[in-house]
Amino acid sequence: MTLRGMSSSLDSAADSLSIGAEPVLRVGVSPPLPVLRFFLAGRYALADVTVGPGWCRAEPGDQGVVVACEETSRLLPSPVILTPCRQAGTFVIPAVPVGAGFHWNHREDLTYPGSLELVAAGSRALVGVNRVGLEDYLESVISSEMNPCAPEPFLEAHAVVARSWVLAQLGPPRSVEEARPPGVDMWEWFDRRNHDLFDLCADDHCQRYHGQSRKLAAASQAVRRTRGTALYAKGAVVDARFSKCCGGVTEDFTTAWGGPPPTGLTSVLDASPLPPEWPHSLTVEAGAVPWIMGFPPAHCSITDAGILDRILLPMDRATEHFFRWREEFSQERLASLIEAKTGAGIGSVKGLKALRRGSSGRIEILEIQGVRGVLRIGKELAIRRLLSSSHLKSAAFVAMPGEMIGGIPRQITLTGAGWGHGVGMCQIGAGALAAGGADCAAILNHYFPEAELAAAY
Ligand SMILES: [Zn+2]
Ligand SMILES: [Zn+2]
């Protein structure tokens, strides 16, 4: 165990918090398809026969799923489970969409460990679900999310955060009910409850999971060194989150998601104590505007290319400006984005106003003032989706109008802070802390000061 300094709490809490055994996850690894082709790299048990190695195809039928391999063709009730005869057995799904909805999206043939479950999604489609042990899943997730050249304590901290998040998702469902505030037109957030056929999806919505294909030794070792360890607060596993860059302060859970906030997840200043000229209350415009328009010294404000190259994957490294960024909208582009996505008919945009900001300055409720009416939307991801053809980097922004013609700006420029929802561990900040010599326990203690480490199994 390399979690130096946290071993005493680990020992004392271990008995009461242990769930006994490593859980098996059901991860959705294909979108709903009318036909799913897959390659078995070894022998697999299918009902009362064994099949593979070789190609198979599965199609939904009226009474279940038809699975056709070289040896046999069977109609079986959904879900159909193919289990490897040897523990190390793997299967391949060709041309899996990777990075759906993001600019790096592409298709790849991906190899998975464990069992394949074929689940009917209605009578015309089915999805492929990978049944995989949590630790095996994490080895892949850490390899896919982060650069294996990153400092070891950072990869370890990431493994603990990702494990805690998964365990929280497997636990009792959290209430996500939250009434739409008066006067707000759109009130949306997106969480795991959107999945009903499996526990987790394989994309950024949950955590990037690319099976065996991306597993890298450094990430696997970080997972093994922290095996079974998770963050706990008040006797419950912490629903720990992470995002790329908080922008200097981490965000409140409730700015991004509905329902009461989980215990052990609070906003923290992602910096050493700040010089007094930096205001702390970013929930009010007088604090948020100078903070976002400025460049306060924070752990995640690093510009050192050598450290960033070690922390981030090449596809993320392509995003150059994340601590502070600018995006300019022409009136035509902004008005047409809003009309295309809402159909609200508010016409040309006169201005954008933050009605409610969270602790990091991210906007929870945005008012869009149009010539024919106003539109109020939340929460942070709904705002980021509305103002972009994919996702705006973050909802912590200040909107400045450009040249005015008849009371309508020709352009609106957003100056923004951070990348992602900003809740929980700030990946770039944690990487910078690790590069500066912090160990795994110190990193976790910084981002989750109310939590302690304990063994889940
Ligand atoms: Zn998901
Ligand atoms: Zn940060």
Image: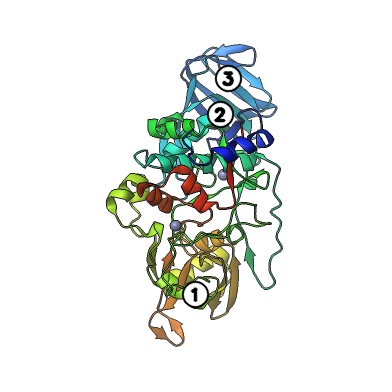
Residue position for label 1: 287
The amino acid sitting under disc 2 is Val
Residues marked 2 and 1 touching at CB (< 8 Å): no
Residue position for label 3: 83
CA gap between label 3 and label 1 equals 56 Å
Residue position for label 2: 132
Residue at image point 57% right, 12% down: 50
Would residue 54 appear left or right of 315 to someone viewing this image? right
Q: Please report whichever mark, 3 or 1, sits nearer to the chain's N-terminal start.
A: 3
Disc on res. 340: none
- Crowding at mark 2 (Cα within 10 Å: few <14, some 14-19, many 20+): many
Q: Observer-nearest residue: 166 or 18? A: 18
x and y, in percent, of residue 158 in the image? 47, 43
The amino acid sitting under disc 1 is Gly
The answer to whether the beta carbon of the residue marked 2 is less than 8 Å from any atom of ligand 1 is no
Residues marked 3 and 2 touching at CB (< 8 Å): no
The image quarter in which residue 189 lies: bottom right
Q: Please report whichever mark, 2 or 1, sits nearer to the chain's N-terminal start.
A: 2
